[in-house]
């Protein structure tokens, strides 16, 4: 095997298909080179080397030395420069690049190959001494930080002092001599902190940098990023070594980043920023305020400095040609990094750009309309989970706003929360359930956990492509960046805007769509569901086979879910209706009754209430199936827990407090989850289920008569383990139905079925199906009972289980396909063997999780049921599963 793959000068050993091997950056550099775009030549050391590097105790095999030497020779052959040659030195960048982009997570070193001698050669060949020393000081600073791990603060401080000494405000004001002096100071700092002089041997420099890139794969911030984004730790990173091109060679040189379409709104307009006479990360680091790419964007922002279109029209035209070419080639929006060296354009990176949910939707629909992709591809392209961002409320345009300032609209959505000034505090307060807004001068990779915990992010510095903006968009967090009038005093935990002061803990609101920052909490309105969203959903509905229902029991939830396209109710939990303050007294009376007669008296009070609940739901869900689960939780859940409440209840029930407490003690269970609940209640107190069945059928008849449209009740018996249990309950329900239909003189269709939530039920599904019209997999309980893990107590250890790879993901969020999934598969097969038209659905939390939905498609369930806001996600995920 070999580890080095070349690109540039007419050769490309790899291409866009080799992302696993070459990383995204390396694969796309090779691809761009092979379609004739101007890419500085270089080579990629594959991710396989990274794996081997860690297997072999962080060392390289001898064979790699020769391969790297060949790679360098490849670059030398094309550029005509020689690595380490004092007269005409080749300089390279050493760049990390994993399979998927990890913004700002990995380290890159630029201008490598400079030393006290080659810097003279660079000055001579470029005819620009200032440029040569600027490059050298940049190199030492980056190398000291990334490779030697020295304190980068002290280098920045030295730069600030140098600028102050010379009376300069900007880096661009520094002269050749200023940079030379700073370089000397940098070398002194290296000697002081590292105990050795700055490495002068260019090969030592190169191997140091390669090792550092591989080493950065296991850095803390890279690990955190991987954990948050479900990226496996064994993928490894590739290393790219590439000839330098220089954006810092004066006024005809520049560096920039661009998107072929607007990543925030999805609009078809070039979008980006660039800086004249600058290098590498200057644009995203917020050192100078970058300039706009296009004239239109500059004018829209009312900014003065010329756009690239105006300042470098020819190079801009060339760049625009490349944008078009890349979009047609990749058939997707591209995120591009480029450099202009003395008027010549060089491409340094391209990848499918990250985008907001709104932009993803718009681009998918637009590109299908443009004929760039098919409608199926458009459906496949939008991440269902990202829709979440769109389905939530935005700021009420009518509401009053106390606007403090305006920054850049870096990531859309609105958020209100308490101001915090550091990532750790953000995390701590969020854990306690508080909504927080993280306010920073600018963010860095160390802030990731805080950004994740925050509802929104506000920065004082940085542009639309700054770290804060990119990461926030990726996470779906609203973000306002570059709010320049914000004066943050992180030590005093406050910020000032003009004469206003906002302290830690005070509430602000940010609007990532307009850039506005407001004092206090601003009310929100429901989202717009027509337009691109509606179009894509329509396309998705054409593709999907699975039906999508909702889990809902309140009229408001039922309406929301219907609005989102729910095709029925998969789970209506009746106990929620029992908790209602107006009814709880009757419920308690029923529980405290000592005989059937007493229970029936209390149930008679509940009957009309239940009936009107069901009637309301049947009307909203007109013509659609509604699955109603009979009472499930253990009865003691309805009894009071507080001393004061006991007195009140005792009085209402006409009992002594002592008697009430005795009854509560009788009902106490050591393990209520496995106790007297589910159909066990129906078996011991049939009158409870009888009342519920009566309420369902009376309501159904009432609605059928009122609206002319008969509802389709599906009566569901919970926690069944054996055929006999269900048979008893079904008899009871059927008898009740007959009685109601006889009384009302009207017959209606209905189904009786069960939840499959115990392993025994899954195994004996063949028998149970004899008396069941449908199965609904209650995967919350089925996960608990299969794994023997209580969901309410799992928090303490589940994170460790996921970190150690015991579970790939939290099994309560994403179905344990291997274990619980196998039980579902068995139950589906055995059930269908008995009854080919057995209806199968899922009503656990998993019904709204895209990975779990893909599994449901694979076992060909009939429907999934998700909470109202997840209905669109489920529709899209179901379509993707069918493709
Ligand atoms: P990241 O993955 O963090 O974006 P990159 O490897 O892309 O890191 O490097 C960051 C920036 O450094 C690039 O956007 C580019 O501006 C600059 N850069 C990298 N390699 C070169 C090169 N060979 N010549 C000029 N600039 C480069
Ligand atoms: Mg970087
Ligand atoms: Mg990059």
Image: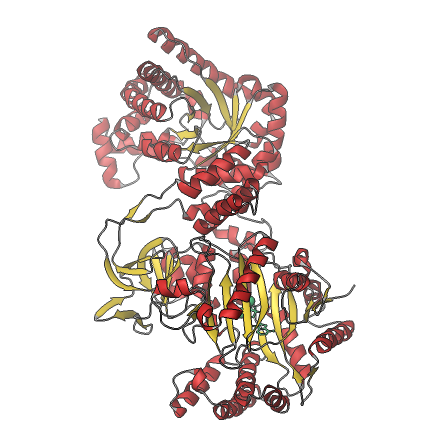
Is 301 left or right of 732, judged from the image as shown?
Answer: left
- Numbered-mark total: 0
Q: Quadrant of ligand 1?
A: bottom right
> Picture coordinates of residue 660 (x, y %)?
28, 31
Position of residue 664 relative to residue 457, above or below, is above
| Residue 761 image point, x, y percent | 56, 27
Q: Quadrant of the C terminus?
A: top right
Is residue 748 depicted above or below 446 in this figure? Answer: above
Q: Nearer the viewer, residue 485 or 201?
A: 485
Residue in the image at 50% along x and 20% along y: 726
Farthest residue toward the front?
A: 314
* Location of residue 379 in the rendering, given as x and y in whole percent from the top left corner: 53, 42
Q: In the image, what residue occupies the spot 46% across and 24% down? A: 717
Q: Quadrant of the N terminus?
A: bottom right
Nearest the eye: 831 or 83: 83
**Residue 246, placed above or below residue 716:** below
Colour scheme in use = secondary structure
């Amino acid at each position: 095997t070999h580890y080095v793959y070349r690109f540039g000068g007419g050769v490309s050993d790899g291409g866009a298909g080799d992302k696993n091997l070459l990383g995204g950056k390396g694969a796309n550099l090779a691809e761009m080179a092979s379609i004739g775009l101007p890419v500085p030549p270089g080579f990629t050391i594959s991710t396989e080397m990274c794996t081997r590097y860690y297997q072999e105790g962080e060392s390289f095999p001898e064979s790699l030395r020769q391969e790297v030497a060949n790679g360098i020779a490849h670059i030398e052959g094309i550029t005509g420069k020689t690595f380490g040659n004092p007269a005409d030195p080749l300089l390279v960048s050493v760049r990390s690049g994993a399979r998927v982009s990890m913004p700002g997570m990995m380290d890159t070193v630029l201008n490598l190959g400079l030393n006290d001698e080659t810097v003279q050669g660079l000055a001579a060949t470029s005819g620009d001494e200032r440029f040569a020393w600027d490059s050298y000081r940049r190199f030492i600073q980056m190398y000291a930080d990334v490779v030697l791990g020295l304190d980068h603060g002290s280098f920045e401080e030295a730069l600030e002092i140098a600028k102050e000494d010379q009376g300069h405000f900007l880096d661009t004001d520094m002269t050749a001599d200023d940079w030379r002096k700073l370089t000397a100071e940098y070398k002194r700092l290296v000697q002081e902190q590292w105990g050795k002089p700055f490495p002068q041997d260019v090969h030592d420099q190169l191997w140091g940098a390669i090792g550092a890139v591989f080493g950065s794969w296991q850095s803390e911030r890279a690990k955190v990023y991987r954990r948050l984004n479900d990226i496996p730790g064994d993928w490894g990173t590739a290393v790219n070594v590439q000839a330098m091109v220089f954006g810092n060679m004066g006024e005809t040189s520049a560096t920039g980043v661009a998107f072929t379409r607007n990543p925030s709104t999805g609009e078809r307009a070039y979008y980006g920023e660039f800086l004249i006479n600058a290098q590498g990360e200057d644009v995203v680091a917020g050192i100078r305020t970058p300039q706009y790419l296009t004239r239109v964007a500059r004018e829209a922002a009312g900014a003065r400095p010329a756009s690239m279109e105006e300042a470098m029209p020819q190079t801009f035209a060339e760049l625009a040609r490349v944008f078009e070419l890349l979009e047609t080639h990749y058939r997707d929006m591209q995120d591009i990094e480029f450099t202009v060296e003395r008027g010549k354009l060089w491409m340094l990176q391209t990848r499918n750009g990250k985008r907001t949910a709104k932009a993803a939707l718009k681009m998918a629909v637009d590109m299908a309309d443009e004929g760039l992709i098919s409608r199926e591809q458009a459906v496949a392209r939008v991440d269902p989970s990202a829709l979440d961002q769109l389905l939530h409320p935005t700021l009420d345009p009518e509401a009053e706003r106390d606007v403090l300032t305006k920054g850049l609209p870096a990531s859309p959505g609105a958020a209100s929360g308490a101001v915090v000034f550091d990532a750790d505090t953000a995390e701590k307060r969020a854990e306690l359930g508080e909504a927080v807004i993280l306010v920073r001068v600018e963010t860095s990779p160390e802030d990731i956990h805080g950004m994740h915990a925050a509802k929104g992010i506000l920065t004082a510095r940085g542009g639309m492509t700054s770290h804060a903006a990119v990461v926030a968009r990726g996470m779906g967090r609203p973000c306002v960046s570059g709010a320049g009038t914000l004066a943050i005093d992180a030590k005093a935990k406050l910020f000032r805007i003009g004469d206003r002061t906002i302290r830690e803990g005070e509430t602000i609101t940010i609007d990532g769509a307009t850039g506005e920052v407001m004092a206090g909490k601003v009310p929100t309105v429901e989202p717009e569901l027509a337009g691109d969203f509606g179009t894509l959903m329509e396309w998705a509905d054409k593709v999907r086979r699975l039906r999508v229902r909702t889990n809902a029991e309140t009229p408001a939830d039922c309406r929301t879910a219907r609005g989102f396209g729910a095709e029925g109710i998969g789970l209506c939990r009746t106990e929620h209706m029992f908790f209602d303050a107006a009814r709880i007294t009757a419920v308690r009376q029923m529980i405290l009754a000592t005989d059937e007669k007493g229970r029936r008296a209390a149930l008679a009070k509940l009957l009309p209430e239940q009936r009107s609940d069901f009637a309301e739901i049947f009307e909203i869900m007109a013509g659609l199936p509604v699955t109603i689960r009979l009472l499930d939780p253990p009865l003691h859940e309805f009894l009071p827990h507080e001393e004061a409440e006991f007195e009140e209840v005792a009085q209402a029930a006409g009992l002594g407090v002592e008697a009430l407490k005795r009854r509560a003690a009788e009902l106490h269970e050591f393990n209520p989850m496995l106790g007297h609940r589910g159909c066990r209640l129906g078996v011991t107190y049939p009158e409870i289920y009888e009342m519920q069945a009566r309420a369902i059928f009376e309501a159904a008849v009432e609605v059928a008569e009122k609206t002319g449209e008969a509802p389709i009740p599906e009566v569901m018996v919970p926690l069944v383990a054996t055929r006999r249990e269900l048979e008893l309950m079904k008899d009871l329900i059927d008898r009740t139905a007959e009685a109601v239909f006889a009384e009302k003189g009207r017959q209606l269709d209905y189904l009786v079925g069960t939840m499959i939530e115990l392993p025994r039920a899954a195994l004996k599904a063949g028998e149970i199906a004899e008396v069941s019209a449908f199965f609904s997999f209650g995967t919350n309980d089925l996960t608990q009972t299969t794994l023997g893990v209580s969901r309410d107590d799992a928090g303490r250890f589940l994170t460790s289980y996921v970190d150690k790879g015991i579970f790939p993901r939290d099994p309560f969020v994403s179905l344990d396909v291997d274990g619980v999934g196998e039980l579902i598969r068995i139950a589906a097969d055995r059930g269908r063997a008995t009854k080919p038209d057995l209806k199968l659905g899922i009503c656990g939390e998993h019904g709204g999780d895209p990975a779990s939905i893909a599994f449901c498609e694979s076992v060909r369930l009939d429907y999934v049921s998700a909470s109202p806001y997840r209905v669109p996600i489920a529709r899209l995920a179901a379509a993707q599963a069918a493709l």
